Image (spheres, grey):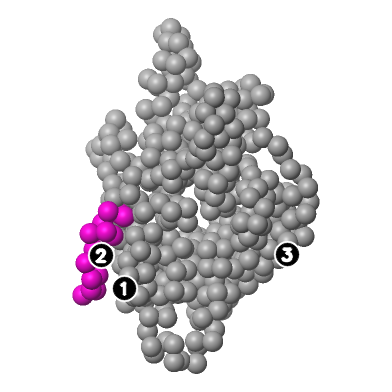
Amino acid sequence: MIDLQGFGDQLLFGAWMTLKVAAGGLLLGLLLGIMGALFKLSGMRALYVLGAGYTTIIRGLPELLVVLVIYFGSAGVLTQIAGWFGHDGYVELSPLAAGIIALGISFGAYATEVFRGAIQAIPKGQIEAARACGMSNPQVFFRIVLPQAWRIAIPGLGNLFQVLLKDTSLVSVVGLEEIMRKSQIAISNTKEPFTFYFTAALIYLSITVIVMIGQRYAERWASRGLVRRSE
Amino acid sequence: MNWNWEVIFASLPQLLEGSLLTLELVFISVLIGGFLSVPLAILRTSENPLVSGIPLFYTFFFRGTPMLVQLFLFYYGLAQFDSVRESFLWPLLREAYWCALIVFTLNTCAYTTEIMRGAIQAVPRGEIEAAQAIGMNRYHLYRRIILPLAYRIGLPAYSNEIILMLKGSALASTITLLDLTGMARTIIARTYMPIEVFFAAGCIYLLLTFLFIQGYRLFERRMMRHQKPI
């Protein structure tokens, strides 16, 4: 077997950090994605331009660049804003916060398109029926549109989450102690780069497999209202 | 917050130089990866699990791990083995440029193999049966019927893969290469103006993807000209 020379637990801590960034990015990304889709479908020109600009720009930029911009770029802006409130020190984001924000923004841009497709796939008649029952707009969205949109969106979102998981490795570039960074620390002590990067690869592969299984359950959960009878 | 346009203009020549390396890496790896993916995809569609298993293992590894891990595994990892350091390949493998090229090629090839597999399997059965009925052998069947159709079915997904590769090439900067992102990071280390320089680099990336999408649209129209409404 692979001899990790006592760094195994460090790699596991790294894996935990990877999962934290991924979960945070997923949550933020889902919010941004739903908002982006609503903006694009709102029928209001200004909101549409905002949503379209968001997806076009973010999907055209490398994820690494987004991570670097959020981490290094935010410090200047945040320090400035803190200055207005009378704080004259240096303000910067932690690598974890920067990672969650950067990956969330990236995920959200792609998720916007997934949600937009899913929302558009819901029959117009249902929305008209809900309105006819006297539901308000938020009620129509949360009771009729969103529960059904999940079912259509989950396969696409699952693929995006797989991409997000792999992109968490980019946050190691700004110093977050996730799997890659922990591997680098172990390597600087043991001088065995292949052993640790290969272990890191195996950890990513196992997380990927677990997520694939989880995705299958999520799909089943989202389509629980859709009973297939073979009569 | 003072926006400094001068830094942007002063760094443009270097950023454009970095873009050339980015384009070079992407072009070569996508070209070679594309060629290699076709035979792999054909193996992948085999009904014999032993034959389809090998490319499946390869694509599973390269699609299931981050490209950053693959890059580090090649660039830093291989040096762990004396046999690699003493082999005739070492002059290549110790260069960041060749490592990046090899990893990008293997990575894009894995994704393209899966795109091509899907495309080959989506070729209508009737076309294959018709070709067999007029007596084509396997070579002619693939050469004349299956592959030309599969290329066209896989065309839209392939453009996504190339764009992902263009963006993924930013990782070359993590192994010391001065591609567009690498150049930007070097300039920032010197000027301490992250927002301006990243802004300029981001604009170049957007321009590259925009130009690529426009060019690909023309290419796709040309490839699909048999379906053009008269």
Q: Residue at x 45, y 92 (%)?
A: B87
**Are discs 3 and 2 both within one chain?**
no
Give the residue number, with chain letter if any, for mark 2: A7
**Are discs 2 and 1 both within one chain?**
yes
Examine the structure image and report whether residue A71 is included in the region drawn in magenta.
no
- Residue A208's x, y, as percent? 33, 55
* Residue B177 sits above or below residue A167 on the image: below
Q: Which residues are magenta?
A: A1-15
| Mark 2 / mark 1, whichever is N-terminal | 2
Amino acid found under the numbered disc labelled 2: Phe
Task: Count neighbours of disc 3 (C-alpha within 10 A) and say few if under 14, some if 14 to 19, many if 20 or more.
Answer: some
Examine the structure image and report whether residue A3 is included in the region drawn in magenta.
yes
Q: Is residue B176 visible?
A: yes
Q: Secondary structure at mark 1?
A: helix
Chain containing the residue with disc 2:
A
- Residue B89's x, y, as percent? 50, 88
CA gap between label 1 and label 3 equals: 37 Å
Give the residue number, with chain letter if any, for mark 1: A190
User: Quick one: which residue is furthest to the front in this view?
Assistant: A88
Look at the numbered discs 2 and 1 and tell me whether their residues touch, using CB distance below 8 Å.
Answer: yes
Look at the numbered discs 1 and 3 and tell me whether their residues touch, using CB distance below 8 Å.
Answer: no
Q: Secondary structure at mark 3?
A: helix
Give the residue number, with chain letter if any, for mark 3: B17
